[in-house]
Amino acid sequence: MIVYEYPFSERIRTYLRVERLLERLLDLQHRDSANDHHFALQTLFELMDITSRADVRGDLLKDLDKQKSNLVAYKDNPNIDSSMLKDLLAQIETCHKQLSATPGKPGQSLNDSEWLMTLRGRMGIPAGTCEFDLPGYHDWLHSSVQQRQTQLTGWSSAFMPVYKALQLILRLLRDNSSPKTVSAPGGSFQQQLSQGRSFHLLRIEVPTNSGLIPEISGNRMLIAVRFMSADEQRRLQPVKDDVNFVISLCS
């Protein structure tokens, strides 16, 4: 299945973007190719940009506190697995401590590296990191794989407290839903949302290779989905047939 996610707030939108960048960075830095490590650095700089504009650390700390308060209320509930609840509370506490121990913006310490900052500026120029522009970077790309991976791991470690907290918060959010199969007559679907419950994320699942592409719009009151398909030039055309798909509203 292919999963499409749609956030209902700017905070969750930022979380999803940071998650995507961190997953890409971790994937690229463990590869061997110099080209992969070039794009790992580019991803690292994107992370620095997005976390410098938003208070990701502060928002995550607030969400961890909120989740802890919500879970503590279940301690005396006989229908709750006490060992699982205890383990989850321990995970929240660990993430909170690690994140609290990280001062300032995530990755802020990387600004002290003159080499990284020079490279960051040159990466904003098309092919601005050629050997005649940055011979030192050209030399780094030809250093051993182990050396490059070790340095990339060290640089990305500045974001690991954020990554662990983000993984936990988004897992709890995604798990707090009840997926159901619905139909979109003629490729269109609308649903009003209950005003007594606050939803933060919409997830839509469609079969892999189905060619169905959901265009999603909405807010905390109403969601609308229009299914499209791509022609040979990747231009999107409305689907006119009825479409069955899985929808999850996460709160």
Image (cartoon, rainbow, N blue to C red):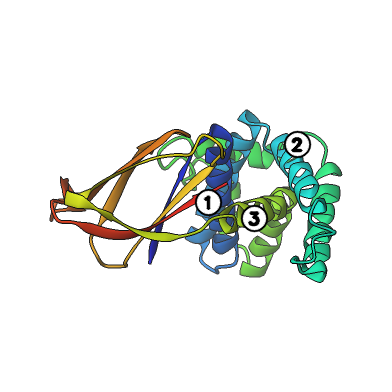
Using the image as rendered, state which of residue 102 and residue 193 is in the foreground.
Answer: 193
- Asked whether, in this view, residue 14 is left or right of residue 240, the answer is right
| Furthest residue toward top | 53
Compare residues 202 and 133 and report the one nearer the observer. Answer: 202
Residue 20: numbered disc: 1
What kind of element bears circle 3?
helix
Q: Earlier in the sequence, mark 3 or mark 2?
A: 2
Residue at mark 2: 112
Left or right of residue 249: residue 70: right
- In the rendering, at what x and y percent does residue 191 appear? 36, 42
Q: Is residue 160 above or below residue 6?
A: below
Disc 2 marks which amino acid? Answer: Asp
- Tell me the kind of residue under disc 3: Leu
Can you see residue 135? no
Q: Is residue 108 left or right of residue 24?
A: right
The answer to which of marks 1 and 2 sits earlier in the sequence is: 1
- For marks 1 and 3, the one nearer the N-term is 1
Q: Comparing marks 1 and 2, which lies closer to the viewer?
A: 1
Q: Which one is in front in this view, the residue at disc 3 or the one at disc 2? A: 3
Q: Nearer the viewer, residue 117 or 213?
A: 213
Question: What kind of residue is marked 1?
Answer: Arg
At which x and y percent is residue 58?
74, 35
